[in-house]
Image: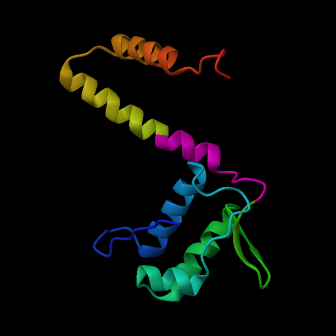
Amino acid sequence: MDIHISPHDDVPIYAQIVNQVKYLVASGRLAPGEELPAIRVLAQQLTVNPNTVARAYQKLEEAGIVEKRRTAGTYVSAAGSPLARRERRKILIERIDALLAEARQLGIPTDEVVELLRQRDEILQPDPEEA
């Protein structure tokens, strides 16, 4: 699990961990049933207090993203995160906003951006004959 924290960020460290785990789950990099590192292990990797990681894991459990198994560790919820779809949409919306802002700076109208999206989607569709 690849998590990076910034002690100089205005976002508390536990929240940075929560946000990054949510992203990893929503993006599919952490699959349902996959085990998260033990609290002490992740704390050591990030050089933070284990209580900080424990708080992050507690928030993730409250959100239904992970589940603790008694004496067996912390796992990505097998049922899938109730927030996964919302998180994926949030990530996509951020990228769309950036694309639209860049298109405006380049003087490209929104209808042209939409048409480009459609064209690119057609190009990126898998070939049914190759499946």
Q: Is residue 87 magenta?
A: yes
Between 20 and 62, the one nearer to me in the picture:
20
Using the image, determine if residue 69 lies above or below residue 62: below
- Which residue occupies 25% across, 16% down? 108
**126 with respect to 99 (left or right):** right
Residue 63, position in %: x, y?
66, 62
Residue 71, position in %: x, y?
77, 85
Toward the front, the furthest residue is 130
Q: Is residue 38 magenta?
A: no
Quadrant of residue 57 within the rendered picture: bottom right
Magenta segment? 78-91
Using the image, determine if residue 113 lies above or below residue 22: above
Task: Quadrant for the C terminus, please.
Answer: top right
Quadrant of residue 103 within the rendered picture: top left
Using the image, determine if residue 44 lies above or below residue 20: below
- Which residue occupies 56% across, 74% down? 56
Using the image, determine if residue 71 lies above or below residue 3: below
- Which residue occupies 40% across, 32% down? 96
- Which residue occupies 63% across, 75% down? 58
